[in-house]
Image (spheres, helix red, strand yellow):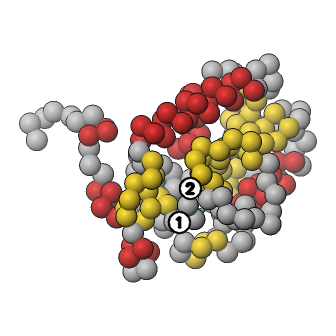
Amino acid sequence: MDGKVLPLAQQENELLQDLERVLYSEEEIARRIQELGRQISEDYRDKQLVLISILKGGIVFLADLMRSITIPHAFDLVGASSYRGGTQSSGKVIITKDVTLDLRDKHLLLVEDILDTGHTLNVVCEVLKIHQPASLDICCLLDKGRERTINVPLKYTGFQIPDEFVVGYGLDFREYYRNLSCIGVLKPEVYSE
Ligand code: IMP
Ligand code: MG
């Protein structure tokens, strides 16, 4: 290298080679988040909005979404672990961290990376209801769109995706791939190794 620093978008992340295909590029994600931010800013005008994200996968989405929202709002974090042995949900959800803000009478919008079986969001919603918010809704970047027995209050969706295991933009496989700027389908040989 001659000392020149490449713009982020032109740098090759070595994790890209583990992807079978890219579903959404950095630019496509950014465009959709701008649209969501505009809509949320309209819908929650003059309301006390608090965004709540779920550690760890949701924080990349939260960081971009909150900067595309143009009305005042606060945010808080919940820790939830949905024990997955590999790529399948076990259905068991453990809350590892509660919120710290006073959420009573606030309008809560849960900001989550992906909706699969709905178990995680269902448990987090139950925990948040204890705080007696004025309203509770969900903004999820990805929806696997599968049939669910659990009913979760999904108000905004970034993208509907096929029922495949995806990584990137906060989403991990065994804690890796969260730092990919795009969202892609992981090569099956990576998780069957
Ligand atoms: P659910 O409880 O089955 O809805 O699963 C939700 C959680 O599982 C998400 O918050 C993610 O952390 C994780 N998850 C579900 N699908 C995927 C995926 O395709 N890639 C990575 N993580 C996933
Ligand atoms: Mg998650």
Q: Position of residue 165 (x, y in %)?
A: 51, 65
Point out the image quarter for the N terminus.
top left
Residue at 40%, 54% (x, y): give it: 22
Front residue of this view, candidates 101 and 73: 73
Residue at 72%, 65% (x, y): give it: 147
Please state if 59 lies on the left or on the right of 187 as rendered. Answer: right
State the SS at label 2: loop
Label 2–label 1 contact, CB within 8 A: yes
- Residue 14 in sight here: yes
Q: Position of residue 98 (x, y in %)?
A: 75, 50
Front residue of this view, candidates 37 and 163: 163
Mark 2 lies on residue: 161
> Rounded to the nearest whole Å, what is the CA distance between mark 2 and mark 1?
8 Å
Mark 1 lies on residue: 164
Question: What's the amino acid at mark 1?
Answer: Glu
Compared to 178, does 163 lie above or below? below
Question: What's the amino acid at mark 2?
Answer: Ile
| Among the 4 quarters of the image, the one containing residue 110 | top right
Please identify the residue farthest to the left as the structure is shown. 2
